[in-house]
Image (tube, helix red, strand yellow):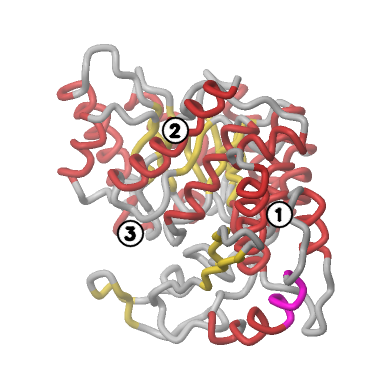
Amino acid sequence: MAIKAGATSNGFLYDGPTVQPGFTSIVQPGFVISMMLVLEDGSVALGDCLDVIFAGAAGRDRIFLPAEHIDFVNGEVAEYLTGLDVSTFRANAEAFDAHAFDGGATHMAIRYGVSQALLHATALANRCTMAEVIAREYGTTIGTEILPILVSVAKTDQVLLDRMIMKQVDLLPHASFTVVETDLGLDGSKLTDFAGMLANRIKEIGAPGYMPRIHLDTYGTVGELFDNDAAAIVEYLLKIKKIVEPYALLIESPVIAETQDKQIEIYRAMRDGIAAREGGLKLIVDEWCNTLDDIRLFGAAEAADFVQIKAPDLGGLGNSIEAVIHCNEIGLGCCLGGTANETDQSSRITTHVGLACGPDFLLAKPGLGGDEAWMIQGNEMARTIALVHFRA
């Protein structure tokens, strides 16, 4: 919000006053409280409490600052968990998510981290994978193929972009187009030029038959450029779609409206406009679609082609599991996502949710380096699939 209010770029940082409560600077490091549940047989279950990189924006929970929560975790949360029977996951996760501690609502980052540790604990107790726990308790079927992954590549990092093309990643580059003047251009030409460059580079160095989906996350800047005029936005986005052909195009967050109702209204208008034209362009909603109830709301309104199920924002992992299941039931596309601010552990656990529930694709995490997330998530899925096949 501070950047959109005109903060001045200073390398990776920004100069200017903060806007969201809890921030001491516009860009600051993320921190995690790591949960370690020691089971009676000595096994240790792990989960990490964390939030997303744009904390506090568009209806999200306040930024997670461990110093504000560590006493609560070491006190009330530890007391709640001590002696808990972890032979099953779902009931424990739902109970913790709903529990009213003395301090009031529990920050979503704590609910996220505790639920990861509870899932890991149940898998350890049953000597099986976390995907098998989820499939058994939620009645799903574990996938037999590695899920597609959307890698994140900075738009200025040509070398990393080339590496991802060489590795034949499924979706790219995500990137971050957050400021109209510098990322889109006041006439929109900077984004169209980037899209054209990317498509040409895939054709130039990509392996024969390599057909990735192109994904661009615009953080509401397209709406800012066209004053949230749905018809003008559609015209511009279809222009980009034409530029990147023959590759499929997904646009995330072309609009970030002031309210959730307005977000739904504009997204529906954009989808209607695309359907009335040549179609094919897919819209992903992120902001204002933060919780399981939000996802159900956008689905019922048919206000998006895909939702990003941003796992930390949903709190307990059970909510992300139910969100993927719900999207599949109503035919709404979904990315089981999260944030670059996640850890190796939370990223691995997300892949188990994905294999057990079947989202359309995963967001690469942790970090924005491409290689690391592609490796951590891809290897975890490969190992899990092999183990499940072996047991079958």
Task: Check the image and report above or below for 369 versus 258.
Answer: above
Q: Which of marks 2 and 3 is nearer the N terminus?
A: 3
Tell me which residue sits at (64%, 54%) in the image: 121
Q: Quadrant of residue 213?
A: top left
Q: Which of marks 1 and 2 is nearer the N terminus?
A: 1
Tell me which residue sits at (55%, 46%) in the image: 350
Q: Residue 289: in sight, yes or no?
A: no
Q: Distance between the residues labelled 1 and 2?
A: 30 Å
> Which three-letter amino acid code belongs to the residue tagged 2?
Arg
Q: Quadrant of residue 127?
A: top right
Q: Residue 181 carries which label?
A: 3
**x, y percent for residue 91:** 82, 52
Task: Check the image and report above or below for 240 versus 22.
Answer: above
Residue lying farthest to the front in this orientation: 41
Q: Give the range drawn in magenta.
A: 76-81
Q: Residue 286: in sight, yes or no?
A: yes
Lateral position of residue 257 relative to residue 378, left or right = right
For the residues carrying marks 2 and 3, which lies nearer the camera in this image? 2
The residue labelled by disc 2 is 383
Mark 1 and mark 2 residues within 8 Å of each other at the beta carbon: no
Lateral position of residue 365 relative to residue 326, left or right = left
Q: Distance between the residues labelled 1 and 3?
A: 31 Å
> Which three-letter amino acid code belongs to the residue tagged 1?
Thr
**x, y percent for residue 137:** 77, 38
Q: Earlier in the sequence, mark 1 or mark 3?
A: 3
Q: Residue 291 carries which label?
A: 1
